[in-house]
Image (cartoon, helix red, strand yellow):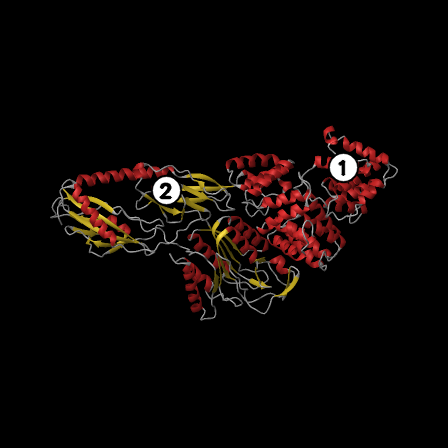
Amino acid sequence: MPKFHHAKRLCAYLLIVAAMLLSIGTAFAAVTEVSGRRVALVIGNSVYKTLPSLPNPANDVEEVASTLRAAGFDVTIGVNVDRIGLEDTVRRFLRSTSNAEAGLIYYSGHGIQVGGQNFLVPVDATLETPYDVETQTMPLDLILNHLKQNSRVQLIFLDACRNNPFNAQKFWMAEKLEPVGATRGLARIDSDLGSLIAFSTEPGQVALDGTGALSPYSESFIKRASEPNKEIRQVLTDVRRDVIAMTNGKQVPWENSSLMDSFYFIPAPPPPSVESMQQVSVPEGAATTKLPIAPPHDETGSALLVTLNQLPKTGKLSFDGKPVEQGAKMPAAALTGLTYDSSGVAAGTVGLIGYTVSDPYGQATQGVVAITVSADAGAKLAQLEQEKQVRLADADAYLKTLPRDVSTTIGVGPVEASLPVVPASVAEMTFKVAALPDKGTLRAGDRVIGLGHVLESADISTLSYEPGIGTENQPFALTLKAANEDLPPATVTFKPVLDACDTSAAAPLDLQGVTSGKLPNEIDPDDALTACTNAVKAYPEVARFVYELGRAQLANRDTKTAFATIKKAMDAGHVRAISELSALYLVGASVPANAGKSSEIAALGAKKGDPYALYAYGKSLYYGRGAKADQQVGLRLMLQAADLGHTYAMNELGYIFLNGINVPPDVERGIRFYESGLKRDDIYSMNSLGMIYRAGKGVPQDLDKALELFRKAAEGGQPYAPRNIGLMYRDGLGVSKDEAAAISWLEMGAERGDYWSALERGRMAKGDVSNAQSQVTAAHYFALASALNMPGTGDPKKQSDKELASLPNTAKKKAAEAFSGEMTAQELKALPKTKSLNERLVLLAKATWVKRNPRYDLF
């Protein structure tokens, strides 16, 4: 090896050699990194209550969930879920899908196809009667269609093709009674652009449970999806080959893909990071000098392999006391253990080590180490060792400053961890992620971080964490340790929390929300207004907070301001705001009532899958209110809303089927929907079932049960239940007659806005003909009833108008005076002019009721 006496000549020589070595580097394929959010819904149902239990699904999905988490998915998992549990799990998942890069569904359990549609079967399903599919199962299309609107790539895996164990052979599907059919398994699903649908076996065929702890399909999927740098279509080809072999050809997995881009569960990271040129000095005549070589690494912390392509011409290179030969392979960490024997090598001699660093993905990077023999190298090595010890001490001190709690708000995007900047002395060190939150997404800048990943020092201060939906009050640990150094690790605890606006004013079934939400009558306007005003200021880009501020304003009876706020939220892209605005147009809150405009707006929300909009637009179509009647489409939309747990839709469907509205009456089908609402503690279902038990319609009459349901509904704020209780006390039905109790309950219902309560209260007062004040009371309530009568109230002929006309003018004038006393002169002046005393009285009744209780958002 030649000697060099001039630094410039030495550097030029090293650069030429480095270029030569790098030019022979192993080629690697560029593979797309994980970018954007990945979300997955994983459900496994094994332990069925009445259907045959399945041995593997619960085991399958636990393993699948772990595999997907390792692949960077934020996983929502459900194991042995009943219908309400399935509903809750699906809603949590749908709330997590907003703007996802990839959305995945993996279902293992019983499934059924009816009318060409596939349904997931929860563990409490019986499927014994024709009514059971629509109230006991979950249509797969409902989940898939929402996923298509909110993610770029959709991946569906169905290991649910068992033999049909169901007793009923026909089931209601909207307006049709559909047969299960002679085919076995599930129905084929055609994929849209950007989708892949995979079945554990061919459509219409049966999958096997296998003899092990996992089904053949899940076992192979877990294995193949864990293999790095393998495109999904190759994964599924390998899965198909495995399953055919495991089942002796009895089961053939099938998929239908229209993916536009390549997709990798475990994509290749950037190639290994290597210092392309390192220079080290060793003392002259030293037998064993440990070479201070910086070890290579890659982002994912993968095991790297080093191949020594070139060794120094002079001196001896050793590892663990044994000579190293050219072409030797060793773990990357072994580079730091190489020693050099410079005995007999003249000072000024330069030797080169050329090496290749390979990762498990087939990628490689080259590195060169120039070893210079120097008479004063010992002092330099001692200095380097001293600097290393200082660096380690600084790193240790820095890590000790990290353990702390970091509060992270859910649903506002990535939240900065605000960890301190690494000191300059530690800038060349790397840190390994030893523990990671299993829910949510950790990032360093735009890069998604996984378990075992390696962080550069500069990455630490850029860390952010985006909590998963539904993770409030669940602490998650991030543990960092210095890579390749024996230092104690440090743990940062992330604590996901809900913003106070979400806590106080989130809406139920809001698929862009982050929590279960509150009904309008549960909102405390003082708390909600303050919280949501602050949230809008802190996160102006989060449209959800704008919408929730509108809900708070409605609860605060500031309807005009609320209308503008909700319109702003809708324009900013919050879907639930669409149905809220539609409802305000329907009842005429701060704008003239306009059923056509209401229906037009609701249609926008229905296209986006919002449960409230599906119900509102479906109802509009079914009854032809504000839109051209289309019972078939209207019915299907309301059924979709019910599938998502919207109890208003369940009640409307119960009413339709019970009473035969545009369909043949089917009492049992109607009761099934009311019972579904009752399971979800819906106050309207309670009231409706109470009426059924009171009348003994389709069930044995049970007045005690009816009264119990009415009371529970009334306690929850239901506006019509007080009337039903009042009539039972008035008539002595199941209770002793009690006129005072009847009056109290009817007045409660009237004040809540129930037309019939006001009408019946007026009739009770009118019957007391000997009491002049009773006639004034009758005028008050008949006028209020006429004021409250709206389309859908059930009294198109307005009996209240006739009752009001039958009263003496003296009573009506006194009632008008009482109403006027509740209003200011300015408010009275604003009322429309009319010469009719009756019309004047109704206008006064409406104005005073609105002034007392303009909660258009309540029911």
Image coordinates of residue 39 in percent, x first then y, are 48, 51
> Callout 1 environment at 10 Å: few (<14), some (14 to 19), or many (20+)?
many
Q: Is residue 236 left or right of residue 720?
A: left
Left or right for 342, reference 837 = left
Give the mark nearer the N terminus: 2 vs 1: 2
x%, y% of residue 250? 47, 70
Residue 591 position by quadrant = top right
> In this view of the protein, can residue 213 be seen by the observer?
no
Would you say 305 lies left or right of 648 here?
left
Q: Name the residue located 52 percent from the left edge and 46 percent from the top edge.
A: 470
Quarter-of-image position of residue 63? bottom left
Residue at label 2?
A: 459
- Which residue type carries mark 1? Leu
Question: Label 2 to label 1, Cα distance in Å?
Answer: 67 Å
Identify the element where label 2 is drawn: helix
The reply to whether callout 2 and callout 1 are in contact (CB within 8 Å) is: no
Q: Residue at x 78, y 32 (%)?
A: 818
Work out whether residue 33 can be spotted: yes
Q: Which residue is mark 1?
A: 843
Q: Nearer the viewer, mark 2 or mark 1?
A: 1
